[in-house]
């Protein structure tokens, strides 16, 4: 019985192929757009997640300058309040802190044999990879001994290795930064791009003492990266660091901090909050397009009922009950909506794939969204098919048979 | 008194159409009994109420007043679902204009009534084929109505009316759209149905020679029966 009804519905839709297709178009476009947009949104979300992971877990960053209520810092760049001794003090005196590393960074032109490459030079301590979740792929990282004598050693990222050395082995090769020769002691494992498209592997790490003395010629550090022992103790660590630094910097009770302790996870989480807003927006677009698509189906079903009044009369005359007629038209509306939903899914998945391929945006297609889209479009069919179907089922057989 | 054995028993049947404020009486108090196995021809001038009467017999329309018993059951008190059941199981209807589903094969047109009584598709198929062969269209099963002649279309319609083995077949001017030769062929079909299968037939016609196939002739005038004659023979 159900199979039969389904076949009748499919046949009726096939009879007016173009009309059925145009009617489905509303649902097709609606579902397609939603699938594609959700895929993009989810892709962005997954990227933020990966980014949080790549920041290292439970990381705090201390930068010079006070933070304003809106999170805006003042005096960035000109403030010279953070010292490497602050980093050491934090690591040793704050119980909630596991590791700390000073950080200095500047973009420099790097020369190796006959190759030239501008990249980000970072001055760090041996603890840095552990804090930020880096791995050394080949060779070694900076060691404490390198710090003591401001050794001219460098650990290079994957991109730098590829660009300066191609297929050759960079270990023990010499590169020149500001004309100072550095020996390459290690290669960092590839980390990929950040959410903003910055290549994290386009970097060179050197001992921070070398960076201070030989490259930048400064005595302070630009930031201190800290890893906290556990996620629960982030707040505690933040407070203890603040107290410690205030004391070390001799800040009076009525004075503002001359530094800011930032939680990178919070920042990443804030950006995922934006995706939440986007999801709500997508949801409303989806409901509007499905509503419009549903009204289109209802309209065509009403036309169809009028056109097929005589058919309805004949079916009733040979024994169809009201509910048989009702079922027939609802199934027709549901088939149309679900088919539109299915085509919309194909369109959405296809266009997400195109976006991924040609615009190189991250996309993530969630199977539960697809199932949901199909379910909702079917529901739209039931909802908007109900009234026309009811109208058909309430026709008077005699009137219907006489209909011209 | 109600005759218990009658297939059809009608008492004081009235039908009044309302068109705005105007009341159009179409049937004005019909009394009639039809026994099982009868072949009844209904005649009368245009507008005398024949079609109105047939539609009520066929459970397609409700009378304004009066009672209609089919196989002893008062039809007026039944629900519309029960009416659908009667139309499906007990009554076959043949129309002047054939009323086949367009763009649907002869076979599927004949299968249509069986779609509403839960028969398995194989059984539906078998019975539709058998019935189509019986009306002489075994070689036309895949033809669409517009690929069939008027006579062939009416045969399909007869097969459709027949396929659920009803006890009553109603035909409202079944030969009205056919030439006299094709009409005669359809009438022979009906006569066979009546004589061999024992199906009760009520048939509306304007033509006296068509009415002669029946063994009872009823005349309508202005919504009333004016004559009711039995001629036990029937035309050969
Ligand atoms: N739906 C309707 N609304 C109003 N009046 C109607 C309706 N159907 C029939 N009538 C009227 O009822 C009367 C009987 O009509 P009916 O169709 O039963 O006649 P008939 O005997 O079948 O005529 P014919 O031989 O032309 O088919 C006519 O006067 C007709 O105008
Ligand atoms: Mg008539």
Image (cartoon, rainbow, N blue to C red):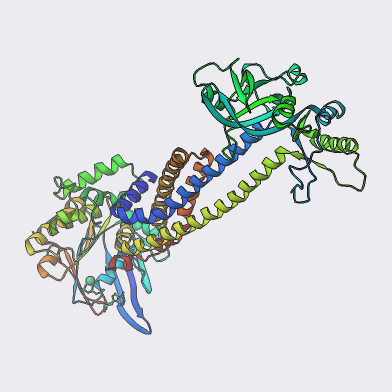
Q: Is residue B6 visible?
A: no
In this view of the protein, which residue sits in the foreground, A26 or B212? A26
In the image, farthest residue toward the bottom:
B21
B28 shown above or below A168? below
B94 shown above or below A181? below
In this view of the protein, which residue sits in the foreground, A109 or A166? A109
Question: Hey, which quadrant is residue A388 in on the image?
Answer: bottom left
Q: Where does ligand 1 appear, by image quarter? A: bottom left
Q: Is residue A66 visible?
A: yes
Position of residue A361 measured from the top left corner of the image (x, y, whole percent): 51, 40
* Residue at x-position 45% and y-position 48%: A32
In the image, farthest residue toward the front:
A179
Q: Quadrant of the C terminus of chain A?
A: bottom left
Position of residue A91 measured from the top left corner of the image (x, y, whole percent): 82, 27
Horizontal arrangement in the rendering, residue A52 relative to residue A354 (left or right) = right
Horizontal arrangement in the rendering, residue A326 relative to residue A277 (left or right) = left
In this view of the protein, which residue sits in the foreground, B161 or A111? A111
Position of residue A359 measured from the top left corner of the image (x, y, whole percent): 47, 41
């Amino acid at each position: 019985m159900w199979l039969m009804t389904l076949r009748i519905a499919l046949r009726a839709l096939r009879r007016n192929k173009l009309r059925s297709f145009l009617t489905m178009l509303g649902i097709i476009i609606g579902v397609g757009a939603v699938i594609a947009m959700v895929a993009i949104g989810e892709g962005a979300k997954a990227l933020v997640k990966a980014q949080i992971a790549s920041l290292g877990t439970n990381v705090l960053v201390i930068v010079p300058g006070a933070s304003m209520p809106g999170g805006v810092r003042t005096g960035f760049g000109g403030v010279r309040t953070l010292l490497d001794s602050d980093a050491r003090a934090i690591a040793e005196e704050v119980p909630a802190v596991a590791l700390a590393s000073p950080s200095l960074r500047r973009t420099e032109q790097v020369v190796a044999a006959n190759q030239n490459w501008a990249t980000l030079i970072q001055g760090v301590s041996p603890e840095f990879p552990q804090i930020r979740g880096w791995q050394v792929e080949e060779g070694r990282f900076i060691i404490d001994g390198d710090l003591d004598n401001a050794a001219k050693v460098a650990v290079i990222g994957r991109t730098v290795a590829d660009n300066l050395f191609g297929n050759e082995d960079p270990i023990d090769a010499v590169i020149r930064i500001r004309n100072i020769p550095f020996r390459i002691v290690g290669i960092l494992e590839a980390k990929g791009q950040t959410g903003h498209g910055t290549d994290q592997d386009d970097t060179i790490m050197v001992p921070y003492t070398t960076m201070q003395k030989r490259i930048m010629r400064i005595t302070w550090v630009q930031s201190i990266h800290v890893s906290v022992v556990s996620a629960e103790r982030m707040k505690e660590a933040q407070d203890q660091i603040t107290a410690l630094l205030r004391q070390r910097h001799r800040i009076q009770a009525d004075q503002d901090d001359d530094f800011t302790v930032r939680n990178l996870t919070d920042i990443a989480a804030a950006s995922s909050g934006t995706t939440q807003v986007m999801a709500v927006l997508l949801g409303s677009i989806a409901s509007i397009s499905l509503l419009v698509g549903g009204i289109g189906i209802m309209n065509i079903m009403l036309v169809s009922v009028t056109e097929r009044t005589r058919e309805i009369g004949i079916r009733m005359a040979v024994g169809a009950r009201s509910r048989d007629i009702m079922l027939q038209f609802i199934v027709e509306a549901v088939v149309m909506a679900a088919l539109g939903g299915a085509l919309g899914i194909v369109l959405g998945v296809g266009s997400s794939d195109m976006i991924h391929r040609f615009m190189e945006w991250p996309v993530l297609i969630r199977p539960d969204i697809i199932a949901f889209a199909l379910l909702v479009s079917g529901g739209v069919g039931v909802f908007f098919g109900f009234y026309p179907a009811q109208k058909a089922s309430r026709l008077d057989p005699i009137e219907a048979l006489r209909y011209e | 008194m109600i005759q218990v054995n009658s297939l059809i028993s009608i008492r004081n049947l009235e039908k009044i159409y309302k068109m705005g404020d105007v009341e159009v009486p179409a049937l004005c108090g019909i009394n009639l009994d039809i026994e099982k196995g009868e072949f009844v021809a209904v005649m009368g001038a245009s507008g005398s109420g024949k079609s109105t009467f047939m539609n009520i017999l066929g459970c397609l329309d409700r009378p304004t007043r009066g009672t209609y018993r089919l196989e002893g059951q008062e039809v007026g008190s039944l629900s519309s679902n029960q009416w659908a059941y009667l139309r499906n199981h007990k009554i076959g209807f043949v129309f002047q204009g054939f009323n086949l589903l367009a763009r649907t094969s002869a076979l599927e047109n004949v299968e249509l009534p069986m779609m509403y009584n839960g028969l398995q598709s194989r059984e539906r198929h078998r019975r539709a084929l058998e019935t189509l062969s019986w009306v002489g269209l075994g070689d036309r099963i895949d033809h669409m109505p517009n690929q069939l002649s008027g006579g062939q279309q009416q045969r399909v319609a007869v097969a459709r009316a027949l396929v659920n083995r009803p006890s009553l077949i109603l035909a409202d001017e079944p030969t009205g759209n056919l030439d006299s030769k094709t009409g005669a062929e359809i009438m022979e079909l009906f006569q066979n149905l009546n004589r061999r299968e024992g199906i009760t037939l009520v048939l509306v016609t304007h033509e006296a020679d068509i009415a002669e196939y029946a063994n009872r002739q009823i005349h309508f005038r202005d919504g009333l029966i004016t004559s009711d004659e039995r001629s036990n023979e029937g035309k050969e």
